[in-house]
Image: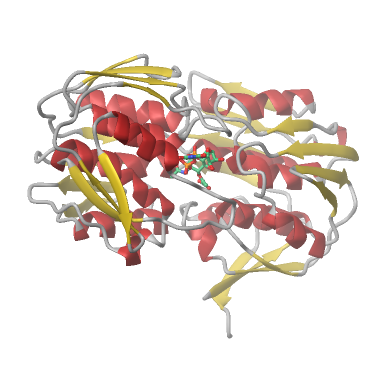
Amino acid sequence: MEKVCIQGDVQLKGTVSISGAKNACLPMLAASLLTDEHCILRNVPQLRDVNFFIQLLQTLGVHVENIAPNTWKLQATHITHEASYDLVRQMRASVCIMGPLVGRLHKVSLPLPGGCVIGNRPIDLHLYGLQKLGCNVSMSQGIIHITADKLCGHSIFLGGPFGSTVTGTANLVMAAVLTPGTTVIESAACEPEVTDLCRLLQQMGAEIEGIGSPRLTIHGQNQLHGFDYTVIGDRIEAGTFLIAGLITNGHIRLEHFDPRHLGALLHVLEEVQADIKVDYESHTIEAFPCLERLKPFNITTLPYPGFPTDLQAQMCVLGLCIPGLSLITERIYPQRFMHIAELQRLGAKIILEGSTAILQGAHPLSGADVMASDLRASAALYLAGLIAQGETFVHRVYHLDRGYENFDQKLRNLGAQIQRSQENS
Ligand code: EPU
Protein backbone atom coordinates (compact mmCIF):
# COMPACT_ATOMS: atom_id res chain seq x y z
CA MET A 1 0.00 0.00 0.00
CA GLU A 2 1.21 3.50 -0.77
CA LYS A 3 1.17 6.69 1.21
CA VAL A 4 1.86 10.20 0.02
CA CYS A 5 3.84 13.01 1.63
CA ILE A 6 2.66 16.53 0.83
CA GLN A 7 4.73 19.58 1.68
CA GLY A 8 2.45 22.39 2.84
CA ASP A 9 2.34 26.11 2.39
CA VAL A 10 2.67 26.17 -1.37
CA GLN A 11 1.27 28.56 -4.00
CA LEU A 12 0.13 26.69 -7.11
CA LYS A 13 0.87 28.18 -10.53
CA GLY A 14 0.37 26.93 -14.08
CA THR A 15 -2.01 25.13 -16.43
CA VAL A 16 -3.84 21.83 -15.87
CA SER A 17 -5.25 19.71 -18.64
CA ILE A 18 -8.41 18.04 -17.33
CA SER A 19 -8.80 14.31 -18.07
CA GLY A 20 -11.87 12.47 -19.34
CA ALA A 21 -14.75 12.09 -16.88
CA LYS A 22 -14.63 8.86 -14.86
CA ASN A 23 -18.36 8.82 -14.23
CA ALA A 24 -19.13 9.31 -17.92
CA CYS A 25 -16.73 6.71 -19.26
CA LEU A 26 -17.74 3.79 -16.99
CA PRO A 27 -21.34 3.51 -18.32
CA MET A 28 -20.00 4.25 -21.82
CA LEU A 29 -17.66 1.26 -21.60
CA ALA A 30 -20.73 -0.75 -20.54
CA ALA A 31 -22.60 0.52 -23.60
CA SER A 32 -20.26 -1.59 -25.75
CA LEU A 33 -22.29 -4.59 -24.48
CA LEU A 34 -25.28 -3.34 -26.50
CA THR A 35 -23.83 -4.31 -29.88
CA ASP A 36 -21.63 -6.91 -31.53
CA GLU A 37 -20.01 -4.21 -33.68
CA HIS A 38 -16.69 -2.71 -32.61
CA CYS A 39 -16.69 0.41 -30.43
CA ILE A 40 -13.97 2.99 -29.82
CA LEU A 41 -13.90 5.19 -26.74
CA ARG A 42 -11.45 8.12 -26.57
CA ASN A 43 -10.28 10.39 -23.73
CA VAL A 44 -10.66 7.52 -21.25
CA PRO A 45 -8.68 8.40 -18.10
CA GLN A 46 -6.13 5.92 -16.76
CA LEU A 47 -7.70 5.03 -13.44
CA ARG A 48 -8.06 2.07 -11.13
CA ASP A 49 -11.86 2.15 -11.65
CA VAL A 50 -11.43 2.06 -15.42
CA ASN A 51 -9.03 -0.89 -15.13
CA PHE A 52 -11.51 -2.76 -12.93
CA PHE A 53 -14.31 -2.05 -15.36
CA ILE A 54 -12.29 -3.24 -18.35
CA GLN A 55 -11.46 -6.44 -16.46
CA LEU A 56 -15.15 -6.90 -15.66
CA LEU A 57 -16.06 -6.53 -19.34
CA GLN A 58 -13.34 -9.01 -20.28
CA THR A 59 -14.76 -11.59 -17.87
CA LEU A 60 -18.11 -11.12 -19.63
CA GLY A 61 -16.41 -11.98 -22.93
CA VAL A 62 -15.78 -8.52 -24.37
CA HIS A 63 -12.62 -8.25 -26.47
CA VAL A 64 -10.80 -5.13 -25.25
CA GLU A 65 -7.74 -3.46 -26.72
CA ASN A 66 -5.85 -0.34 -25.66
CA ILE A 67 -5.17 1.00 -29.19
CA ALA A 68 -3.60 4.36 -28.21
CA PRO A 69 -3.08 6.37 -25.03
CA ASN A 70 -6.49 6.88 -23.39
CA THR A 71 -8.23 5.09 -26.29
CA TRP A 72 -9.92 1.69 -26.05
CA LYS A 73 -11.44 -0.54 -28.68
CA LEU A 74 -14.14 -2.93 -27.50
CA GLN A 75 -16.10 -5.68 -29.20
CA ALA A 76 -18.80 -7.69 -27.47
CA THR A 77 -19.41 -10.48 -29.99
CA HIS A 78 -19.93 -13.47 -27.66
CA ILE A 79 -20.83 -12.43 -24.13
CA THR A 80 -22.13 -14.04 -20.98
CA HIS A 81 -24.64 -12.60 -18.50
CA GLU A 82 -22.82 -13.57 -15.27
CA ALA A 83 -20.56 -11.12 -13.46
CA SER A 84 -17.97 -12.25 -10.92
CA TYR A 85 -18.20 -11.20 -7.28
CA ASP A 86 -14.46 -10.46 -7.03
CA LEU A 87 -14.68 -7.57 -9.47
CA VAL A 88 -18.17 -6.30 -8.65
CA ARG A 89 -17.41 -5.97 -4.93
CA GLN A 90 -14.49 -3.65 -5.71
CA MET A 91 -16.52 -1.09 -7.59
CA ARG A 92 -20.14 -0.04 -7.26
CA ALA A 93 -20.20 1.27 -10.82
CA SER A 94 -20.24 -2.40 -11.90
CA VAL A 95 -24.03 -2.09 -11.67
CA CYS A 96 -23.83 -0.25 -15.01
CA ILE A 97 -23.62 -3.59 -16.83
CA MET A 98 -27.18 -4.46 -15.76
CA GLY A 99 -29.06 -2.27 -18.24
CA PRO A 100 -27.06 -3.21 -21.36
CA LEU A 101 -27.10 -6.94 -20.55
CA VAL A 102 -30.86 -6.85 -20.01
CA GLY A 103 -31.26 -5.01 -23.33
CA ARG A 104 -29.00 -7.36 -25.29
CA LEU A 105 -29.41 -10.78 -23.60
CA HIS A 106 -32.61 -10.30 -21.57
CA LYS A 107 -30.78 -11.61 -18.52
CA VAL A 108 -28.04 -10.74 -16.05
CA SER A 109 -26.70 -12.19 -12.80
CA LEU A 110 -24.86 -9.67 -10.68
CA PRO A 111 -23.60 -9.97 -7.12
CA LEU A 112 -25.19 -7.20 -5.01
CA PRO A 113 -22.42 -4.57 -4.85
CA GLY A 114 -22.73 -4.17 -1.07
CA GLY A 115 -22.13 -1.27 1.32
CA CYS A 116 -20.00 1.77 0.79
CA VAL A 117 -18.14 4.09 3.11
CA ILE A 118 -19.96 7.21 1.84
CA GLY A 119 -23.29 5.83 3.05
CA ASN A 120 -26.10 3.53 2.10
CA ARG A 121 -26.21 3.09 -1.69
CA PRO A 122 -29.22 0.97 -2.59
CA ILE A 123 -30.12 -0.03 -6.16
CA ASP A 124 -33.87 -0.39 -5.59
CA LEU A 125 -34.67 2.26 -8.22
CA HIS A 126 -32.58 0.43 -10.87
CA LEU A 127 -34.46 -2.79 -10.15
CA TYR A 128 -37.86 -1.08 -10.00
CA GLY A 129 -37.25 0.43 -13.44
CA LEU A 130 -36.15 -2.89 -14.95
CA GLN A 131 -39.26 -4.55 -13.53
CA LYS A 132 -41.38 -1.90 -15.25
CA LEU A 133 -39.75 -2.93 -18.54
CA GLY A 134 -40.87 -6.52 -17.92
CA CYS A 135 -37.97 -8.05 -15.98
CA ASN A 136 -38.27 -10.59 -13.19
CA VAL A 137 -35.92 -9.86 -10.34
CA SER A 138 -34.90 -12.37 -7.67
CA MET A 139 -32.01 -12.75 -5.28
CA SER A 140 -30.24 -15.84 -4.02
CA GLN A 141 -26.91 -16.24 -2.23
CA GLY A 142 -26.11 -12.54 -2.60
CA ILE A 143 -26.64 -12.55 -6.35
CA ILE A 144 -29.38 -10.63 -8.16
CA HIS A 145 -30.85 -12.59 -11.03
CA ILE A 146 -32.72 -10.59 -13.64
CA THR A 147 -34.51 -12.26 -16.53
CA ALA A 148 -37.10 -11.15 -19.06
CA ASP A 149 -39.16 -13.30 -21.43
CA LYS A 150 -40.32 -10.21 -23.20
CA LEU A 151 -39.31 -6.57 -22.69
CA CYS A 152 -41.79 -3.79 -23.36
CA GLY A 153 -41.43 0.01 -23.15
CA HIS A 154 -43.12 1.64 -20.14
CA SER A 155 -43.34 4.84 -18.14
CA ILE A 156 -40.89 4.85 -15.20
CA PHE A 157 -40.68 7.41 -12.39
CA LEU A 158 -37.08 7.35 -11.11
CA GLY A 159 -37.20 9.88 -8.26
CA GLY A 160 -36.18 8.58 -4.84
CA PRO A 161 -35.88 10.14 -1.38
CA PHE A 162 -32.56 11.78 -2.38
CA GLY A 163 -33.51 12.80 -5.90
CA SER A 164 -32.92 10.80 -9.05
CA THR A 165 -30.21 8.21 -9.58
CA VAL A 166 -27.29 8.76 -11.93
CA THR A 167 -26.23 5.17 -12.66
CA GLY A 168 -29.88 4.09 -12.36
CA THR A 169 -30.82 6.47 -15.20
CA ALA A 170 -27.83 5.22 -17.23
CA ASN A 171 -28.92 1.61 -16.69
CA LEU A 172 -32.53 2.18 -17.67
CA VAL A 173 -31.68 4.21 -20.75
CA MET A 174 -29.30 1.44 -21.86
CA ALA A 175 -31.96 -1.21 -21.30
CA ALA A 176 -34.67 0.88 -23.00
CA VAL A 177 -32.72 1.55 -26.22
CA LEU A 178 -33.12 -2.16 -27.09
CA THR A 179 -36.61 -2.55 -25.59
CA PRO A 180 -39.50 -2.64 -28.08
CA GLY A 181 -41.93 0.28 -27.75
CA THR A 182 -41.53 3.63 -26.04
CA THR A 183 -40.07 4.13 -22.59
CA VAL A 184 -40.50 7.43 -20.75
CA ILE A 185 -38.20 8.02 -17.78
CA GLU A 186 -39.57 10.74 -15.51
CA SER A 187 -37.26 12.34 -12.94
CA ALA A 188 -34.25 11.15 -14.90
CA ALA A 189 -30.83 12.32 -13.66
CA CYS A 190 -29.63 15.37 -15.64
CA GLU A 191 -25.92 15.07 -14.80
CA PRO A 192 -23.64 15.90 -17.78
CA GLU A 193 -22.32 12.32 -17.61
CA VAL A 194 -25.83 10.98 -18.31
CA THR A 195 -26.30 13.49 -21.13
CA ASP A 196 -22.98 12.43 -22.65
CA LEU A 197 -23.99 8.76 -22.46
CA CYS A 198 -27.25 9.55 -24.26
CA ARG A 199 -25.30 11.27 -27.05
CA LEU A 200 -23.09 8.21 -27.43
CA LEU A 201 -26.19 6.00 -27.60
CA GLN A 202 -27.60 8.26 -30.30
CA GLN A 203 -24.42 7.67 -32.28
CA MET A 204 -25.15 3.94 -31.95
CA GLY A 205 -28.56 4.51 -33.53
CA ALA A 206 -30.69 4.95 -30.40
CA GLU A 207 -33.69 7.28 -30.53
CA ILE A 208 -33.75 9.42 -27.39
CA GLU A 209 -35.69 12.65 -26.88
CA GLY A 210 -35.32 15.16 -24.05
CA ILE A 211 -31.58 14.63 -23.51
CA GLY A 212 -30.36 16.77 -20.60
CA SER A 213 -33.88 17.12 -19.16
CA PRO A 214 -35.62 15.14 -16.37
CA ARG A 215 -37.92 13.46 -18.93
CA LEU A 216 -36.27 11.08 -21.38
CA THR A 217 -38.35 9.44 -24.09
CA ILE A 218 -36.71 6.41 -25.67
CA HIS A 219 -38.00 4.60 -28.75
CA GLY A 220 -36.52 1.10 -28.65
CA GLN A 221 -34.56 -0.30 -31.64
CA ASN A 222 -34.03 -3.88 -32.83
CA GLN A 223 -30.29 -3.45 -32.89
CA LEU A 224 -27.58 -0.84 -32.41
CA HIS A 225 -24.27 -0.08 -34.15
CA GLY A 226 -20.78 0.50 -32.82
CA PHE A 227 -19.47 3.93 -31.81
CA ASP A 228 -16.39 6.13 -31.97
CA TYR A 229 -16.84 8.63 -29.19
CA THR A 230 -14.80 11.06 -27.08
CA VAL A 231 -15.63 11.31 -23.36
CA ILE A 232 -16.27 14.81 -21.90
CA GLY A 233 -13.78 16.40 -19.48
CA ASP A 234 -14.16 15.61 -15.80
CA ARG A 235 -16.05 18.44 -14.05
CA ILE A 236 -15.19 17.07 -10.60
CA GLU A 237 -11.47 16.95 -11.37
CA ALA A 238 -11.74 20.50 -12.73
CA GLY A 239 -13.58 21.68 -9.60
CA THR A 240 -10.96 20.03 -7.39
CA PHE A 241 -8.12 21.87 -9.14
CA LEU A 242 -10.04 25.14 -9.09
CA ILE A 243 -10.41 24.85 -5.31
CA ALA A 244 -6.72 23.87 -5.04
CA GLY A 245 -5.81 27.09 -6.87
CA LEU A 246 -7.98 29.24 -4.59
CA ILE A 247 -6.88 27.77 -1.25
CA THR A 248 -3.19 28.14 -2.14
CA ASN A 249 -3.76 31.71 -3.33
CA GLY A 250 -2.41 30.50 -6.64
CA HIS A 251 -2.81 31.40 -10.29
CA ILE A 252 -3.99 28.43 -12.31
CA ARG A 253 -5.64 27.80 -15.64
CA LEU A 254 -7.81 24.78 -16.40
CA GLU A 255 -8.44 23.50 -19.91
CA HIS A 256 -10.16 20.67 -21.80
CA PHE A 257 -13.53 20.58 -20.05
CA ASP A 258 -16.80 22.47 -20.40
CA PRO A 259 -17.18 25.20 -17.69
CA ARG A 260 -20.98 25.03 -18.14
CA HIS A 261 -20.84 21.71 -16.28
CA LEU A 262 -19.54 23.53 -13.19
CA GLY A 263 -22.32 26.13 -12.97
CA ALA A 264 -23.18 25.56 -9.30
CA LEU A 265 -19.53 25.81 -8.17
CA LEU A 266 -18.89 28.90 -10.30
CA HIS A 267 -21.97 30.56 -8.81
CA VAL A 268 -20.73 29.93 -5.26
CA LEU A 269 -17.26 31.19 -6.16
CA GLU A 270 -18.79 34.37 -7.54
CA GLU A 271 -20.70 34.82 -4.26
CA VAL A 272 -17.53 34.41 -2.19
CA GLN A 273 -15.89 37.03 -4.46
CA ALA A 274 -13.25 34.78 -5.97
CA ASP A 275 -11.29 36.25 -8.87
CA ILE A 276 -12.09 33.85 -11.68
CA LYS A 277 -12.25 34.25 -15.44
CA VAL A 278 -14.43 31.78 -17.33
CA ASP A 279 -14.14 31.40 -21.10
CA TYR A 280 -17.05 29.33 -22.37
CA GLU A 281 -15.75 29.47 -25.96
CA SER A 282 -12.28 28.08 -25.40
CA HIS A 283 -13.41 25.85 -22.49
CA THR A 284 -10.97 27.33 -19.97
CA ILE A 285 -11.14 28.77 -16.47
CA GLU A 286 -8.45 30.91 -14.87
CA ALA A 287 -8.25 31.52 -11.11
CA PHE A 288 -6.18 34.43 -9.80
CA PRO A 289 -4.75 34.95 -6.30
CA CYS A 290 -7.62 36.31 -4.15
CA LEU A 291 -7.61 34.27 -0.93
CA GLU A 292 -7.51 37.29 1.37
CA ARG A 293 -10.80 38.71 0.16
CA LEU A 294 -12.93 35.53 0.11
CA LYS A 295 -16.21 35.52 2.08
CA PRO A 296 -17.77 32.52 3.88
CA PHE A 297 -20.43 30.48 2.11
CA ASN A 298 -23.48 28.31 2.76
CA ILE A 299 -24.08 25.46 0.30
CA THR A 300 -26.24 22.36 0.02
CA THR A 301 -25.42 19.44 -2.23
CA LEU A 302 -28.18 18.50 -4.67
CA PRO A 303 -28.61 16.57 -7.90
CA TYR A 304 -27.39 18.38 -11.03
CA PRO A 305 -27.63 21.30 -11.75
CA GLY A 306 -27.35 21.73 -7.96
CA PHE A 307 -24.05 21.67 -6.10
CA PRO A 308 -22.30 18.28 -6.66
CA THR A 309 -21.79 15.99 -3.68
CA ASP A 310 -18.53 14.93 -5.30
CA LEU A 311 -17.07 18.39 -4.50
CA GLN A 312 -18.40 18.57 -0.95
CA ALA A 313 -15.22 17.30 0.78
CA GLN A 314 -13.02 19.65 -1.25
CA MET A 315 -15.30 22.59 -0.37
CA CYS A 316 -14.74 21.80 3.31
CA VAL A 317 -11.07 22.70 2.77
CA LEU A 318 -12.03 25.96 1.05
CA GLY A 319 -14.26 26.78 4.04
CA LEU A 320 -11.27 26.22 6.34
CA CYS A 321 -9.35 28.97 4.52
CA ILE A 322 -11.99 31.71 4.80
CA PRO A 323 -12.44 33.75 8.01
CA GLY A 324 -15.89 33.27 9.56
CA LEU A 325 -18.37 30.39 9.49
CA SER A 326 -19.13 28.45 6.33
CA LEU A 327 -21.89 25.83 6.19
CA ILE A 328 -22.07 22.73 4.02
CA THR A 329 -25.18 20.54 4.04
CA GLU A 330 -25.04 17.12 2.36
CA ARG A 331 -28.36 16.06 0.84
CA ILE A 332 -27.27 13.23 -1.47
CA TYR A 333 -25.27 11.11 0.99
CA PRO A 334 -26.08 12.48 4.47
CA GLN A 335 -23.23 10.45 6.01
CA ARG A 336 -20.53 11.42 3.53
CA PHE A 337 -18.33 13.15 6.11
CA MET A 338 -15.51 10.69 6.79
CA HIS A 339 -12.99 13.39 5.91
CA ILE A 340 -14.07 15.63 8.82
CA ALA A 341 -12.31 13.62 11.53
CA GLU A 342 -9.14 13.53 9.42
CA LEU A 343 -9.23 17.27 8.76
CA GLN A 344 -9.63 17.75 12.52
CA ARG A 345 -6.35 15.88 12.97
CA LEU A 346 -4.72 18.72 11.03
CA GLY A 347 -6.25 21.23 13.46
CA ALA A 348 -9.39 22.12 11.50
CA LYS A 349 -12.25 23.64 13.48
CA ILE A 350 -15.33 21.80 12.25
CA ILE A 351 -18.57 20.83 13.96
CA LEU A 352 -20.83 18.25 12.39
CA GLU A 353 -24.50 18.71 13.16
CA GLY A 354 -26.59 16.05 11.45
CA SER A 355 -25.66 16.31 7.81
CA THR A 356 -24.35 19.88 8.08
CA ALA A 357 -20.68 20.70 8.55
CA ILE A 358 -20.00 24.02 10.26
CA LEU A 359 -16.53 25.20 9.33
CA GLN A 360 -14.68 27.86 11.24
CA GLY A 361 -12.14 29.17 8.81
CA ALA A 362 -8.69 30.77 8.88
CA HIS A 363 -7.27 28.70 11.75
CA PRO A 364 -3.83 27.49 10.68
CA LEU A 365 -3.56 23.77 9.89
CA SER A 366 -0.47 21.77 10.71
CA GLY A 367 0.69 18.64 8.90
CA ALA A 368 -0.09 15.20 10.37
CA ASP A 369 -0.81 11.60 9.38
CA VAL A 370 -4.31 11.22 7.93
CA MET A 371 -6.26 8.32 6.45
CA ALA A 372 -8.08 8.45 3.12
CA SER A 373 -11.49 6.77 3.34
CA ASP A 374 -12.88 7.26 -0.16
CA LEU A 375 -12.12 8.96 -3.43
CA ARG A 376 -13.27 12.53 -2.79
CA ALA A 377 -12.17 12.46 0.86
CA SER A 378 -8.66 11.63 -0.42
CA ALA A 379 -8.72 14.66 -2.70
CA ALA A 380 -9.77 16.85 0.24
CA LEU A 381 -6.87 15.54 2.33
CA TYR A 382 -4.42 16.34 -0.49
CA LEU A 383 -5.83 19.88 -0.62
CA ALA A 384 -5.54 20.25 3.14
CA GLY A 385 -1.94 19.01 2.92
CA LEU A 386 -1.15 21.79 0.43
CA ILE A 387 -2.12 24.50 2.94
CA ALA A 388 -1.00 22.91 6.22
CA GLN A 389 2.30 23.89 7.84
CA GLY A 390 4.93 21.17 7.42
CA GLU A 391 4.37 17.71 6.03
CA THR A 392 1.08 15.81 5.72
CA PHE A 393 1.08 12.07 5.14
CA VAL A 394 -2.02 10.71 3.43
CA HIS A 395 -2.39 6.95 3.96
CA ARG A 396 -4.46 4.52 1.85
CA VAL A 397 -3.97 6.76 -1.13
CA TYR A 398 -5.22 4.02 -3.48
CA HIS A 399 -8.68 5.53 -3.02
CA LEU A 400 -7.50 8.60 -4.91
CA ASP A 401 -6.15 6.54 -7.82
CA ARG A 402 -9.67 5.22 -8.42
CA GLY A 403 -10.76 8.55 -9.83
CA TYR A 404 -8.00 11.11 -10.49
CA GLU A 405 -5.64 10.53 -13.42
CA ASN A 406 -2.04 11.49 -12.66
CA PHE A 407 -3.11 13.66 -9.73
CA ASP A 408 0.32 13.78 -8.05
CA GLN A 409 2.08 14.72 -11.27
CA LYS A 410 -0.50 17.33 -12.23
CA LEU A 411 -0.07 18.98 -8.81
CA ARG A 412 3.74 18.77 -9.10
CA ASN A 413 3.51 20.53 -12.47
CA LEU A 414 1.79 23.38 -10.59
CA GLY A 415 4.63 23.56 -8.06
CA ALA A 416 3.46 21.20 -5.31
CA GLN A 417 5.97 18.97 -3.54
CA ILE A 418 4.47 15.50 -3.36
CA GLN A 419 6.15 12.15 -2.93
CA ARG A 420 4.81 8.63 -2.78
CA SER A 421 6.35 5.74 -0.92
CA GLN A 422 5.38 2.27 0.24
CA GLU A 423 3.49 2.23 3.54
CA ASN A 424 6.16 0.16 5.31
CA SER A 425 9.26 2.02 4.05
N1 EPU B 1 -30.50 5.98 -4.41
C1 EPU B 1 -31.59 5.25 -3.98
N2 EPU B 1 -31.96 4.14 -4.69
C2 EPU B 1 -31.29 3.74 -5.82
C3 EPU B 1 -30.19 4.49 -6.25
C4 EPU B 1 -29.81 5.62 -5.53
O1 EPU B 1 -32.20 5.58 -2.98
O2 EPU B 1 -31.68 2.75 -6.43
C5 EPU B 1 -30.06 7.15 -3.64
C6 EPU B 1 -28.62 7.02 -3.16
O3 EPU B 1 -28.55 6.32 -1.94
C7 EPU B 1 -28.19 8.46 -3.04
C8 EPU B 1 -28.94 9.13 -4.19
O4 EPU B 1 -30.02 8.26 -4.51
O5 EPU B 1 -28.65 9.01 -1.84
C9 EPU B 1 -28.11 9.36 -5.43
O6 EPU B 1 -27.44 8.17 -5.81
P1 EPU B 1 -27.07 7.83 -7.31
O7 EPU B 1 -27.70 6.54 -7.67
O8 EPU B 1 -27.35 9.01 -8.18
O9 EPU B 1 -25.52 7.60 -7.21
P2 EPU B 1 -24.69 6.62 -8.11
O10 EPU B 1 -25.29 6.58 -9.46
O11 EPU B 1 -24.47 5.34 -7.39
C10 EPU B 1 -23.09 8.44 -9.09
C11 EPU B 1 -21.61 8.67 -9.11
C12 EPU B 1 -21.14 9.08 -7.72
C13 EPU B 1 -21.88 10.36 -7.32
C14 EPU B 1 -23.40 10.11 -7.38
C15 EPU B 1 -24.21 11.36 -7.10
C16 EPU B 1 -20.91 7.11 -10.81
C17 EPU B 1 -20.16 5.88 -11.18
N3 EPU B 1 -20.95 7.43 -9.52
O12 EPU B 1 -23.30 7.38 -8.16
O13 EPU B 1 -19.76 9.37 -7.85
O14 EPU B 1 -21.52 10.73 -6.02
O15 EPU B 1 -23.76 9.64 -8.70
O16 EPU B 1 -23.90 12.37 -7.99
O17 EPU B 1 -21.42 7.79 -11.68
C18 EPU B 1 -17.57 9.66 -7.06
O18 EPU B 1 -17.23 9.85 -8.26
O19 EPU B 1 -16.80 9.88 -6.10
C19 EPU B 1 -18.90 9.15 -6.79
C20 EPU B 1 -19.23 8.57 -5.63
Q: Nearer the viewer, residue 415 or 422?
A: 422
Structure colour scheme: secondary structure
* Residue at x-position 13% and y-position 47%: 76
Q: Nearer the viewer, residue 232 or 12?
A: 232
Residue 10 pos. (x, y %): 74, 54
Residue 244 pos. (x, y %): 67, 45
Q: Quadrant of residue 391?
A: bottom right
Is 269 displayed left or right of 94 in the figure?
A: right
Q: Residue 389: tell me if it is visible.
A: no
Residue 289 pos. (x, y %): 76, 37
Is 218 displayed left or right of 358 in the figure?
A: left
Q: Is residue 256 above or below residue 370?
A: above
Q: Is residue 71 above or below residue 218?
A: below
* Residue at x-position 26% and y-position 46%: 71
Q: Nearer the viewer, residue 40 or 182?
A: 182
As drawn, which residue projects farthest toward the top? Answer: 209
* Residue at x-position 26% and y-position 29%: 133
Quadrant in which the C terminus appears? bottom right
Q: Is residue 268 above or below residue 216?
A: below
**How many numbered marks does the figure carry?**
0
Is 25 displayed left or right of 222 in the figure?
A: right
As drawn, which residue projects farthest toward the bottom? Answer: 425
Q: Residue 162: tell me if it is visible.
A: yes
Q: Quadrant of residue 166?
A: top left
Residue 362 pos. (x, y %): 89, 47
* Residue at x-position 52% and y-position 76%: 1
Q: Nearer the viewer, residue 356 or 305?
A: 356
